[in-house]
Image (cartoon, rainbow, N blue to C red):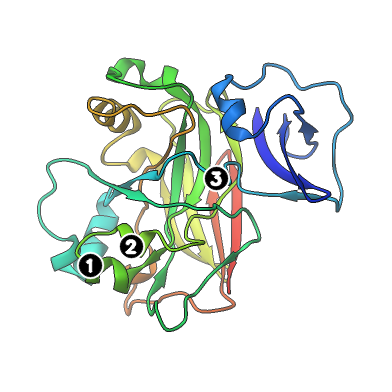
């Protein structure tokens, strides 16, 4: 099943689709967080599908209940390029996963703008990531039980201001500016993707492939991430975990190549779809 948040005649609605083309509104759910808490649906409703110009696809979770939990330096090749860009900020040994949070007032969806923050940000960067959506409150989850707590998967662009990220010696501010969490186009239910996910992941800028890898290359895999986090905190239903980005980000290129106004960034993950945004 594929779950969407859409806007119809100025009103946000939750919808489901079996094929990503015909969208069926799920009127009994207040929003996506409500749908997740209730476990989703088993069958597409019999109502007529909504298609056409009056339907706008938004982020599947426009207003997350909590900060997005992110993994840093979670692909080996990305670790190499990050260290090359700034060994002070990104170098050193990492015996344990790097966790940080990303403040999200509002997550924009496909085709929405990514603000460039002229005068504040001089090194705007993209990071295509697999997002994991927790389906029920998770605490002290064993590795072998992690799959039972996953509602589904989406695409997250962990947009980053590298000058702010490295200047403050921690990553929160440089990751959390308004508009820095595009997400979508949908949530694909966990039962539609083999576990653990081994999905092609890529990012294109103005049609040029910059990132090209597979989620099987995660250093800390999804069972490790969720079991470790849930040892000391409750991951509420609807929690979003961005699992890290592969090599090919702007700061990793030679020379570093950051985003400019008008650039088109397209994040793709096999089996989920495409998240396309324009820098404004």
User: Can you tell which quarter of the image residue 276 is in?
Assistant: bottom right
Q: Position of residue 155 (x, y in %)?
A: 52, 46
The disc placed on residue 173 is 2
Asked if residue 20 is positioned above or below residue 56 in the image, the reply reads above
Residue 120 falls left or right of residue 36:
left
**Does dot 1 land on a helix, a strand or a loop?**
loop
Q: Give the mark nearer the N terminus: 3 vs 2.
A: 3
- Residue pictured at 61% horizontal, 34% vertical: 32
Tell me where residue 186 appears, x and y as whole percent: 62, 41
The residue under the point 49% across, 32% down is 238
Q: Residue furthest right?
A: 48
Q: Which residue is disc 1 drawn over?
A: 168
- Label for residue 35? none
Residue 278 appears left or right of 105: right
The CA distance from mark 3 to mark 2 is 19 Å
Residue 63 is tagged as: 3
Rendered view: 260 above or below 21: below
Q: Secondary structure at mark 2?
A: helix
Measured Cα–Cα span from mark 1 to mark 2: 8 Å
Quadrant location, the C terminus: bottom right
**Disc with the residue nearer the chain's start (1 vs 2):** 1
Q: Quadrant of residue 255?
A: bottom left
Residue 54: x and y in percent read: 85, 51
Which residue lies most toward the bottom here? Answer: 119
**Local secondary structure at mark 3:** loop
Residue visible at 64% across and 55% down?
110
**Dots 1, 2 in contact, CB < 8 A:** yes
**x and y, in percent, of residue 129 in the image:** 43, 49
Q: Does the CB distance between marks 3 and 2 fall below 8 Å?
A: no
Q: Does label 1 or label 3 sit earlier along the sequence?
A: 3
Task: Tell me what residue is drawn at x 37 percent, y 38 percent.
Answer: 216
């Amino acid at each position: 099943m594929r779950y969407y948040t859409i806007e119809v005649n100025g009103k946000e609605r939750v919808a489901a689709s079996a094929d990503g083309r015909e969208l069926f509104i799920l009127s009994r759910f207040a929003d996506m967080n409500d749908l997740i808490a209730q476990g989703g649906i088993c069958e597409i409703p019999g109502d007529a599908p909504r298609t056409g110009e009056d339907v706008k696809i938004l982020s599947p979770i426009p207003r997350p209940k909590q900060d997005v939990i992110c993994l840093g330096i979670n692909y080996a090749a990305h670790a190499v390029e990050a260290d090359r860009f700034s060994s002070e900020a990104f170098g050193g040994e990492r015996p344990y996963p790097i966790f940080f949070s990303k403040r999200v007032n509002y997550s924009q969806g496909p085709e929405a703008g990514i603000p460039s923050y002229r005068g504040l940000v001089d090194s705007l960067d993209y990071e295509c990531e697999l997002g994991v959506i927790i389906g029920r409150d998770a605490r002290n989850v064993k590795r072998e039980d992690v799959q039972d707590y996953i509602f589904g998967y989406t695409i997250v662009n962990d947009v980053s201001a590298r000058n702010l990220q490295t200047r403050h010696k921690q990553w929160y501010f440089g990751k959390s500016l308004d508009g820095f969490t595009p997400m979508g186009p949908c949530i694909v239910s966990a039962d539609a993707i083999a576990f653990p996910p081994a999905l092609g992941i890529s990012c294109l800028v103005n049609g040029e492939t910059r990132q090209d890898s597979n989620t099987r290359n995660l250093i800390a895999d999804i069972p490790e991430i969720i079991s470790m986090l849930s040892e000391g905190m409750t991951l509420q239903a609807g929690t979003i975990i961005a699992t890290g980005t592969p090599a090919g980000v702007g700061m990793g290129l030679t020379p570093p190549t950051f985003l400019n106004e008008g650039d088109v960034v397209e994040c793709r993950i096999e089996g989920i779809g495409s998240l396309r945004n324009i820098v404004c």
